[in-house]
Amino acid sequence: MATSYRKESFLRNAQRLDALFLDVNTVPSIPVNNDDVLYAIEAKYQERPDILADKIYGSTRYWWVFAARNPDQLKDPIRDFQSGVEIYLPVESSVLRNGS
């Protein structure tokens, strides 16, 4: 049975290992861009990258791009998304190119 994922999903290229499990997946990379903005996570977005993604990129489904662009700061994409942590916000063109 084939499973398809939305273009915004980091699982969109995942292969199935068998009927129940996905094989190892590689998260798409978000390249460094000179226009990326250094941003200190605000308290209202603590542990909620989905809400910030919706504000910036227009979809909660891009929550994963922050961890993909900032792997040293966000090893856990939810729990490490803490108020005051400085991350780079990828420019929209990089996100849409790698998320579609």
Image: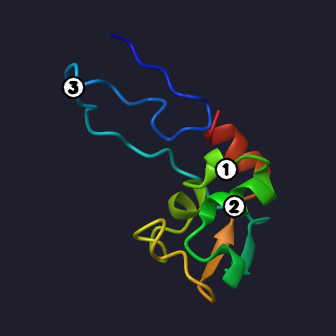
* Quarter-of-image position of residue 55: bottom right
Q: Which residue is mark 1?
A: 60
How far apart marks 1 and 3 lie (CA) works out to 27 Å
Location of mark 2 (residue): 51
Would residue 35 be found to the left or right of residue 61 on screen? Answer: right
Asked if one can make out residue 24 in the rendered structure from this viewpoint, the answer is yes
Query: Reading the chain from its start, which is encountered first: label 1 or label 3?
Result: 3
Q: Amino acid at mark 2?
A: Ile
Give residue 86's position: percent from left, percent from top.
63, 83
**Image height check: is 62 above or below 11?**
below
Mark 3 residue type: Leu
Decide if residue 49 is on the left or right side of residue 58: left
**Residue located farthest toward the bottom when viewing the structure as drawn:** 84
Kindly report which numbered mark, 1 or 3, lies closer to the viewer in this rendering: 1
- Residue at 60% x, 77% y is 46
- Residue at horizontal 71%, vertical 41%? 96
Q: Check disc 1 and report its element: helix, strand or loop.
A: helix
**Distance Cα–Cα, label 2 vs label 1:** 6 Å
Label 3 secondary element: loop
